[in-house]
């Protein structure tokens, strides 16, 4: 579940041109003590996307367009939810995300 992808890891917290996202500047990075968003690079892209899918599945119906509503490409009725181990990983990823959000807000 964890593991770094060089392509994915190199972009967390930055856009395709390597510029920081979300108005993060040197002062914030200095205050936080590390690049913002880097923690996510310790998870592989499938885990990050799986976490996003899991979050969308828990949202109120209609909040997000699903593949079934969009282009019909999803396996109708064949989607299996995440395992308990995956949910544990997703929860850990989200906890780190919330913690970093609080640190950045405080900075």
Image (cartoon, rainbow, N blue to C red):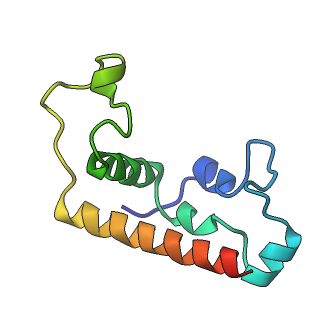
Let me know if residue 50 appears in the view: yes
Q: Residue at x 40, y 50 (%)?
A: 52
Q: Residue at x 44, y 53 (%)?
A: 48
Let me know if residue 33 appears in the view: no
Q: Residue furthest top?
A: 71
In the rendered view, tell whether residue 24 sits above or below residue 29.
Answer: above
Q: Quadrant of the C terminus?
A: bottom right
- For this rendering, which residue is in front, 65 or 2? 65
Q: Position of residue 78 (x, y in %)?
A: 13, 32
Q: Quadrant of residue 12?
A: bottom right
For residue 59, side relative to residue 81 (left or right) = right
Q: Quadrant of residue 37?
A: bottom right
Q: Residue at x 30, y 22 (%)?
A: 69
Q: How many dots with numbers?
A: 0
Q: Quadrant of residue 22?
A: bottom right
For residue 56, side relative to residue 104 (left or right) = left
For residue 79, side relative to residue 46 (left or right) = left
Q: Quadrant of the N terminus?
A: bottom left
């Amino acid at each position: 579940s964890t593991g770094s992808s060089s392509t994915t890891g190199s972009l967390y917290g930055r856009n395709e041109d390597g510029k920081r996202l979300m108005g993060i500047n040197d002062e914030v990075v200095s205050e936080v003590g590390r690049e913002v968003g880097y923690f996510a690079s310790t998870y592989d892209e499938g885990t990050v996307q799986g976490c996003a899918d899991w979050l969308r599945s828990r949202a109120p119906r209609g909040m997000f367009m699903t593949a079934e509503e969009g282009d019909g490409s999803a396996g109708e009725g064949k989607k299996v939810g995440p395992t308990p181990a995956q949910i544990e990983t997703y929860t850990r990823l989200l906890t780190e995300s919330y913690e970093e959000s609080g640190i950045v807000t405080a900075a």
